[in-house]
Image (cartoon, helix red, strand yellow):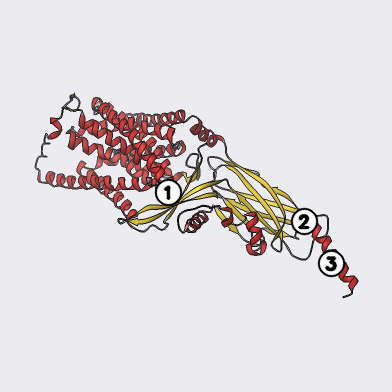
C-alpha cells in the first residue's frame, strides 16, 4: 500500500516504513539507544530527501525517548539535574547545528558532510565499544572484578555542582560541553546522540551506569524537540505522515526489543550493538569510496511559497 | 494530363490548403484535475478527442497527433561528483534555468515523422527542447542537461511514447498518459498538435490541475503558513504516542 507524504512529496510503501520503524524500535528496546543513527541513513536509502529525513528523524526520536524516559522515571534512574545541564548545552548546540546544516545545504555539500559525520562518529564509537566490551567479556569470564573508574582532569575544573542522583560533585563545564556537542550532532545528523552521550557520560563524567540511559533519554527529548521545531520553522521539512508511520512501527518494535534485551547479557548486548554500529559505518564509508552509479544529482530550486 | 485538369488540380490544392488549417481539435480528458490524496499512487489520464473539419479529409499527407503534458517548470541545480582525496564529493554544479518537473510526449507516429525539427524548435515539443538552459559558464554544461534528462527519464518523470496515440480514420484519437506517484502540485499544461508532413496544422491547449486534497492539503498548508503550530503538532503527536506506548505496555505487564 502506497502512501503519499505531503511534505517529502514522494510516495512510499507504508509497510516498508512501518517495518523500518519497527526494526529501529527493536534496536532501541534492546540496546537503549534511539536508533536515529540507523533510521536516518535508511530513510536516505529509500528515497526520502535528506533534509526531510533528518528533520522527521528528530521528531520520531522524541516519541521513542518519551516512551523510554517514562519507564526510567518510574525506576528513578534519571538524574534530572544533570539532564537539565546537558539540555542547556544541547540547545546551544542545536542552534549552531541548524545554522551549519543550512549553510552546507546552500553549498550543496550537506549530504557529504552528514555522511562523513556518520562515518567518523560511528567508526570511533563502534570501535571503542567493541574493544571495551570484548575486554569486559574476557574479564568477566576470568572472574576478575571490573576496574574502578579513575578520577581524571574532569574533576579539577571550576564551577562545581553536586549531582545527587549520580553521586557526583563535578564542574558543569564537561556536561555542558557534551551537551553542546551532542546538540550539534542532533541538528546535523538527525540522531538523538545517545551513542555519543552514553559513552561520554560513563567514561568522561564518571556517572553510574544505571542512571546513564535514563538521563541521556531525558536530555534527548528536549534537544530533538527543539530541533524538530527549528527544522519545521526554518526548512519546513518535518513530515508528520512519515513520522506517524515510523512511530507506530517503532512503538511495537521497542516492546519486542526489550524482551530480547532481557534474554542477553549486558556485555553480549554491547558487542552486538558495537558490531551493528561498525556495519552501518562500513556501508556508508564504502558509498563514499566506491564510484557511485550515478555521479550527477538533481536539486530543484523551489521558490518558497 | 490536359491543361484544364492541371488547373483544376492546383485550384483544388489551394482550397485544400485553406481547409487544412481549419482542422480543429475537440478535446476530452478523463479528468481535468488530479487529486493527491494520502493513498495517491500515480494516475493515468486518458486524453481523447476528435478532429473537427468542414470538408473531406485532405489526402496529401496523413494526419498525425502529438500530445504533451508538462508539469510546473523550475530551475534545477545539477551537481556532479568527482573523486577527491579518495572520496566522491560534489564538485561542479550547473543551474538548468527551467526544467519541467514532469514531461510526457505521446505521438501517433515516430517522433521525427510526426514533427519536423523546425516545428519542434518553434513549439518546444521534444523533452530536450522543453528544458531551457542558457548562459551556463561551466564547460560541457550539455552533459549536465543530458544527465538531468537521463535521471528523470529513469524515474519516469520524462517520457516519450512514440506510436502511443491511437488515431482512427484521421479523426478520432486517444492516448493514456501515466503520471507517477511523486507528483508536485501545479498546473500541468496540456498541448495537442495536429500535424501533416511534420508541419503543425492546428494546436490546442488546456490545463490539468494537480492538487493535494484533504489531509495532504491541510498538512502541507499548515507547514507553510503556520510552521510553529505545525511543529508543535508534530511534537504533540510524538509525545502522546510515546506516552501512550509506555502506559499501554505498563498496563499489559501489570494485568
Query: Can the viewer see residue B219?
Result: yes
The 10 Å Cα crowd at callout 2, few under 14, some 14 to 19, many 20 or more, is: some
Q: Is residue A82 left or right of residue A104?
A: left
Q: State the residue position of label 3.
A: B10
| Mark 3 belongs to chain | B
Rendered location of residue B207, percent (x, y): 65, 45
> What whole-number distance in Å separates the C-alpha atoms at marks 2 and 3?
17 Å
Rendered location of residue A250, percent (x, y): 37, 39
> What whole-number distance in Å separates the C-alpha atoms at marks 2 and 1?
51 Å
The 10 Å Cα crowd at callout 1, few under 14, some 14 to 19, many 20 or more, is: few
Q: Is residue A236 above or below residue A272?
A: above
Query: Can the viewer see residue A168?
Result: no
Rendered location of residue A303, percent (x, y): 51, 40
Residues indicated by labels 2 and 3 sit on the same polypeptide chain: yes
Q: Secondary structure at mark 1?
A: loop
Closer to the camera in the image, A88 or A101: A101
Q: Secondary structure at mark 3?
A: helix
Do residues under tags 2 and 3 come within 8 Å of each other at their CB atoms? no
Q: Secondary structure at mark 2?
A: loop
Q: State the residue position of label 1.
A: A46
Quadrant hosting residue A174? top left
Q: State the residue position of label 2.
A: B21
Residue at the extreme bottom of the image, as rendered: B1
Q: Is residue A284 above or below residue A97?
A: below
Q: Is residue A101 left or right of residue B134?
A: left
| Mark 1 belongs to chain | A
Q: Is residue B99 left or right of residue A281?
A: right
Rendered location of residue A26, percent (x, y): 33, 41
Closer to the camera in the image, A272 or B166: B166
Amino acid at each position: 500500500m502506497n502512501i503519499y507524504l505531503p511534505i517529502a512529496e514522494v510516495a512510499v510503501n507504508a509497510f516498508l516504513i512501518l517495518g523500518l520503524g519497527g526494526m529501529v524500535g527493536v534496536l532501541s528496546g534492546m540496546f537503549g539507544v534511539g536508533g536515529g543513527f540507523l533510521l536516518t541513513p535508511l530513510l536516505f536509502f529509500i528515497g526520502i530527501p535528506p533534509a526531510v529525513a533528518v528533520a522527521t528523524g528528530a521528531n520520531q526520536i522524541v516519541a521513542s525517548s518519551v516512551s523510554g524516559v517514562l519507564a526510567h522515571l518510574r525506576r528513578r534512574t534519571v538524574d534530572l539535574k544533570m539532564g537539565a545541564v546537558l539540555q542547556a548545552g544541547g540547545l546551544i548546540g542545536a542552534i549552531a547545528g541548524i545554522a551549519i546544516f543550512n549553510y552546507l545545504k546552500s553549498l550543496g555539500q550537506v549530504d557529504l558532510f552528514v555522511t562523513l559525520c556518520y562515518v567518523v562518529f560511528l567508526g570511533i564509537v563502534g570501535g571503542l565499544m567493541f574493544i571495551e566490551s570484548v575486554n569486559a567479556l574476557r574479564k568477566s569470564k576470568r572472574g576478575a572484578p571490573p576496574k574502578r573508574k579513575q578520577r581524571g582532569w574532569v574533576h579539577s575544573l571550576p564551577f562545581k555542582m553536586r549531582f545527587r542522583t549520580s553521586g557526583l560533585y563535578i564542574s558543569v563545564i564537561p556536561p555542558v560541553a557534551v551537551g553542546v556537542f551532542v546538540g550539534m550532532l542532533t541538528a546535523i545528523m538527525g540522531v538523538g546522540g545517545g551513542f555519543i552521550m552514553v559513552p561520554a557520560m560513563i567514561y568522561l563524567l564518571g556517572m553510574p551506569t544505571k542512571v546513564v540511559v535514563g538521563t541521556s533519554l531525558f536530555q534527548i527529548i528536549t534537544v530533538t524537540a527543539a530541533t524538530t521545531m527549528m527544522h519545521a520553522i526554518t526548512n519546513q521539512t518535518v513530515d508528520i505522515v512519515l513520522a506517524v508511520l515510523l512511530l507506530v512501527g517503532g512503538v511495537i518494535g521497542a516492546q519486542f526489543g526489550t524482551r530480547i534485551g532481557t534474554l542477553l547479557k549486558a556485555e553480549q548486548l554491547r558487542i552486538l550493538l558495537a558490531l551493528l554500529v561498525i556495519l552501518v559505518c562500513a556501508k556508508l564509508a564504502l558509498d563514499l569510496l566506491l564510484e557511485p552509479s550515478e555521479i550527477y544529482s538533481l536539486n530543484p530550486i523551489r521558490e518558497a511559497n | 494530363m490536359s491543361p484544364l485538369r492541371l488547373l483544376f488540380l492546383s485550384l483544388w490544392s489551394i482550397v485544400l490548403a485553406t481547409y487544412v488549417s481549419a482542422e480543429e481539435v475537440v478535446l476530452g480528458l478523463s479528468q481535468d484535475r488530479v487529486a493527491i490524496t494520502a493513498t495517491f499512487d500515480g494516475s493515468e489520464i486518458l486524453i481523447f478527442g476528435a478532429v473537427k473539419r468542414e470538408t473531406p479529409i485532405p489526402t496529401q499527407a496523413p494526419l498525425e497527433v502529438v500530445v504533451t503534458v508538462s508539469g510546473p517548470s523550475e530551475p534545477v541545480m545539477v551537481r556532479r561528483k568527482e573523486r577527491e582525496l579518495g572520496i566522491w564529493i560534489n564538485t561542479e554544479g550547473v543551474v538548468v534555468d527551467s526544467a519541467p518537473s514532469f514531461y510526457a510526449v505521446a505521438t501517433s507516429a515516430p517522433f521525427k515523422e510526426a514533427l519536423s525539427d523546425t516545428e519542434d524548435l518553434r513549439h518546444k515539443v521534444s523533452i530536450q527542447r522543453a528544458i531551457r538552459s542558457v548562459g551556463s559558464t561551466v564547460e560541457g554544461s550539455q552533459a549536465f542537461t543530458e544527465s538531468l534528462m537521463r535521471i528523470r527519464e529513469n524515474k519516469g518523470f520524462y517520457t516519450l511514447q512514440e506510436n502511443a496515440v491511437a488515431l482512427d480514420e484521421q479523426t478520432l484519437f486517444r492516448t493514456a498518459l501515466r503520471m507517477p506517484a511523486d507528483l508536485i502540485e501545479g498546473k500541468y499544461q496540456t498541448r495537442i498538435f495536429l500535424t501533416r508532413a511534420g508541419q503543425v496544422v492546428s494546436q490546442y491547449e488546456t490545463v490539468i490541475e494537480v492538487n493535494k486534497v484533504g489531509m495532504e492539503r491541510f498538512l502541507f498548508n499548515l507547514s507553510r503558513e503556520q510552521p510553529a503550530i505545525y511543529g508543535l503538532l508534530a511534537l504533540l503527536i510524538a509525545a502522546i504516542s510515546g506516552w501512550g506506548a509506555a502506559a499501554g505496555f505498563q498496563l499489559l505487564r501489570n494485568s
